Image (tube, rainbow, N blue to C red):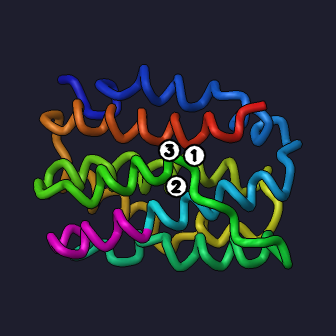
Amino acid sequence: MTTLKELTSEKHREAETQPFLKSIFAGNVDRKKYSEYLYQLLIVYNVLENKADDFKLFEGIEDIKRAKQIELDWVELARNDPIPRLNASTINYCTYLNELTDKDKIMAHVYVRHMGDLFGGQMLAKLLPGNNNMFKFDNIPTLVKGIREKIDVSMADEANLAFEHNINMIKDYND
């Protein structure tokens, strides 16, 4: 049986091999650059989570939401830095998300972003500066099960598109 994870594995690998993410895995990411990236994520997560709330996609997994935790992380790392400008990739992604009216398509984006936080985020949290609140979850197995119950392979094209948007955001921070 093919899974959504298998159907998105190529895009997942592409995201993981971006130079910015490689700098994180190497443990030498620049604080200011990461802070600016967090701000971009904050904007995307606010839009995505509001859209998901419109369709009640977080019922039973409310603790999966990350926007507030991302904001805490950004505030901690930004210190007195000016608020970053939004990158074109962030604006494009938010525009796309705002135009979605299909709950399954929205769920595909929740899958890509939030499952990444649940899994890869646990590894990243050890390598990134700051408290990394966005990667702290209560009861990970329950959240994973809750997401898996809301996804299926029919979401593969949209999940791959979600990865593409995320890759574009990451590319803004490649050296």
Mark 2 in CB contact with mark 1 (< 8 angstroms): yes
**Element under disc 2:** helix
Which label number is shown at residue 89?
3
Which x, y percent locates residue 16?
59, 31
Which x, y percent locates residue 103?
14, 57
- Dot 2 corresponds to which residue? 117
Q: Amino acid at mark 1?
A: Gly
User: Rounded to the nearest whole Å, what is the CA distance between mark 3 and mark 1?
Assistant: 22 Å
Q: Is residue 160 visible?
A: yes
Q: Residues within 10 Å of mark 2 (few under 14, many from 20)?
A: many
Quarter of the rendering occupied by the C terminus: top right
**Element under disc 3:** helix
Q: Residues within 10 Å of mark 3 (few under 14, many from 20)?
A: some
Q: Residue at x 49, y 66 (%)?
A: 43
Q: Which residues are magenta?
A: 46-57
- Dot 1 corresponds to which residue? 120
